Image (cartoon, rainbow, N blue to C red):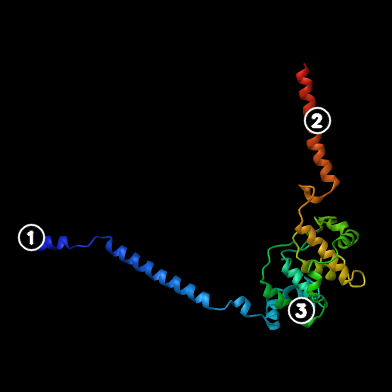
Amino acid sequence: MARQTKRRSTGRRSPWAATLLIGIGLLITGGVYAGASAAMAATEPDTATATSLTIEDGKKLFQANCATCHGLALQGTENGPSLYGVGAVAVDFQVGTGRMPLQMQGPQAPQKPVQFTDEQILAMANYVQSVAPGPDFPDPEILDGEGDVARGAELFRINCAMCHNVAGAGGALTEGKYAPALTEVSALHIYAAMVTGPQNMPVFNDMYLTDEDKRDIISSLLYIQQTESPGGFKLGSLGPVAEGLFIWIFGISTLIGITVWITAKSN
């Protein structure tokens, strides 16, 4: 009886053996699953590029996210304007910059993170264009940034700088409104803003600014975005006001400090 007890005690497994075996099994299973998933992902086509949303998909997206304010037939409601004649580029601008769907009622629609993919935005834009045609997407040549930069800067100064600042840094307007900065705006959205007039911006139609004029303005703004300030720190691109304030605070303070130091040393 004693021998049997001793034999059983020597052959007994460690209490951690079962845990160790389970852990090894989980590691092997997880490794096989991860490898199989990676292999399947490598062989499957990219659904974002392989598929494209249709106008019908855009209609469903519009009805689910926009119809509450703009109406099922784009006729508008008391909470939102009609979309008749706004066109595809207006939808791309408003939704592509995050202004729509509207975050809250106020003097101006605030910009926020975009809530839809590029394909979904394009589908909604095509749907609105099919129901209520308006300004459509421009010729890619207008957005290429290869126009006359100097002429575009002059046109921008004459037509846009009073609100957006001569350097495109934006500025405050009346009643809580503002002109946004243009330092990170895409060429398409610059064009869309000119032809649709969002918020408080006027519409620059072809009778006022031709496509060549718009191309030059876009080229000028893209040049500003891609070029470092030749004067170093831009101080918000506010011009003499910011520069004068900087000189007054730091320059005059430095002169006063030097004067006090010299006076104290002479005594």
Q: Which residue is mark 2?
A: 255
Mark with earlier residue (1, 3): 1
Left or right placement of residue 3 versus residue 239 in this view: left
User: Is 96 drawn above or below residue 134 in the view shown?
Assistant: above
Is residue 107 something that shows in the picture? no
| Residue furthest right as drawn | 207
Tell me which amino acid carries mark 1.
Answer: Ala
Q: CA distance from mark 1 to mark 3?
A: 90 Å
- Which one is in front in this view, the residue at disc 2 or the one at disc 1? 2
Name the residue rendered at 66%, 80% in the picture. Answer: 53
User: Is 223 drawn above or below residue 143 in the view shown?
Assistant: above
Q: Which residue is mark 1?
A: 2
- Which one is in front in this view, the residue at disc 2 or the one at disc 3? 2
Mark 1 neighbour density, 10 Å: few (under 14) some (14–19) many (20 or more): few
| Residue furthest top as drawn | 267
Q: CA distance from mark 2 to mark 1?
A: 101 Å
Left or right placement of residue 206 versus residue 101 in this view: right
Q: Are marks 2 and 3 in contact (CB under 8 Å)?
A: no
Q: Are marks 1 and 3 in contact (CB under 8 Å)?
A: no
In the picture, the quarter occupied by the C terminus is: top right
Check disc 2 and report its element: helix, strand or loop.
helix
Task: Residue 210: give x, y in percent of width and height.
Answer: 89, 71
Closer-to-camera residue (37/53): 37
Mark with earlier residue (2, 1): 1
Name the residue rendered at 79%, 58% in the picture. Answer: 224
Task: Residue 238: give x, y in percent of width and height.
Answer: 82, 49
Q: Which residue is mark 3?
A: 128
Check disc 1 and report its element: helix, strand or loop.
helix
